[in-house]
Image (tube, rainbow, N blue to C red):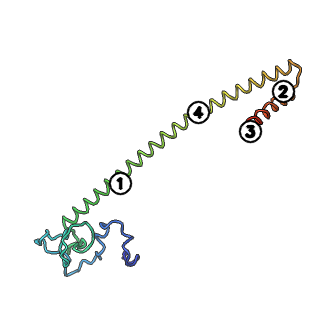
């Protein structure tokens, strides 16, 4: 039995509805039933069954006052048990549907973000390409100017380096 694997702790059981069939052994040759008679005080199907403790509260848990769902001698479950199971399934389906919708919304938001980032990347790429072309043109014009004046490109490079060092010195001090 799975509950013995975890000892006395009930932390492994997240939902008390999963304990619905925990005492079912599959033995069809039982002589007695744990269910009250159908004419009992609460319909006799174990939902709100007062039992020996007399709690009778319908708290939805597997605590005292609730019996496990057991089939009759033919292996059939009562309509109340099947209806409760169907209600539980419907609730679980609604929960899963809500989670799927949330995941879909997140996925759509991720897709929008990716498209926006791609547009921004393309725009930046175009800007850098335009800047590269402008710098290339400026460098070519400077080299032509240096050739016309008779001053070599190394002298101009030294001059611009000295200006950069001067700006750096003024900026720091």
Camera-side residue of 62 and 146? 146
Q: As displayed, is residue 102 above or below residue 167?
A: below
Please tell me which of labels 3 and 1 falls first in the chain.
1
Nearer the camera: disc 1 or disc 2: 2
- Mark 3 — residue? 172
Q: Residue furthest front?
A: 173
Viewer-side residue, 101 vs 133: 133
The dot on residue 122 is 4
Disc 3/disc 2 C-alpha distance (Å): 24 Å
Q: Which residue appears at 75% of the width and 38% of the height?
A: 173
- N-term-proximal mark, 4 vs 3: 4
Q: Residue 133 location, x and y as percent?
A: 70, 26
User: Which callout, 1 or 4, points to the residue nearer the camera?
Assistant: 4
Asked whether, in this view, residue 64 is left or right of residue 163, the answer is: left
Q: Which residue is mark 2?
A: 156
Q: CA distance from mark 4 to mark 3?
A: 36 Å
Q: Regarding mark 2 in the picture, which secondary structure is present there?
A: helix
* Inter-mark Cα distance, 4 to 2: 35 Å
- The Cα–Cα distance between marks 1 and 4, rounded to whole angstroms, is 39 Å
- Labelled disc at residue 96: 1
Image coords of residue 29 (percent x, y): 23, 80
Q: Residue at x 76, y 34 (%)?
A: 170
Labels 1 and 4 touching (C-beta < 8 A): no
User: Which image quarter is the N terminus in?
Assistant: bottom left
Secondary structure of residue under mark 1: helix
Give the percent coordinates (x, y) of residue 140.
78, 23
Please tell me how crowded label 3 is: few (under 14), some (14-19), or many (20+) other residues with Cα within 10 Å: few
Q: Are marks 3 and 1 in contact (CB under 8 Å)?
A: no
Query: Quadrant of residue 164 in the image?
Result: top right
10 Å crowding of disc 2: few (<14), some (14-19), many (20+): some
Snapshot quadrant of residue 37: bottom left
């Amino acid at each position: 039995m799975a509950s013995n694997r975890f000892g006395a702790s009930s932390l492994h059981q997240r939902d008390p509805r999963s304990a619905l069939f925990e005492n079912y052994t599959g033995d069809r040759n039982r002589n007695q039933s744990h269910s009250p008679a159908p004419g009992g005080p609460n319909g006799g199907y174990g939902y709100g069954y007062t039992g020996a403790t007399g709690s009778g509260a319908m708290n939805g848990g597997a605590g005292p006052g609730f019996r496990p769902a057991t089939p009759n001698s033919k292996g059939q479950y009562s309509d109340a048990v099947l209806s409760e199971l169907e209600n539980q399934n419907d609730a679980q389906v609604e929960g899963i549907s809500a989670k799927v919708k949330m995941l879909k919304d997140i996925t759509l938001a991720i897709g929008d973000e990716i498209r926006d980032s791609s547009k921004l990347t393309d725009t930046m790429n175009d800007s850098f390409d335009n800047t590269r072309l402008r710098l290339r043109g400026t460098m070519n014009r400077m080299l032509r100017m240096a050739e016309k004046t008779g001053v070599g490109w190394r002298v101009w490079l030294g001059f611009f380096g000295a200006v950069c060092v001067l700006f750096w010195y003024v900026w720091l001090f």
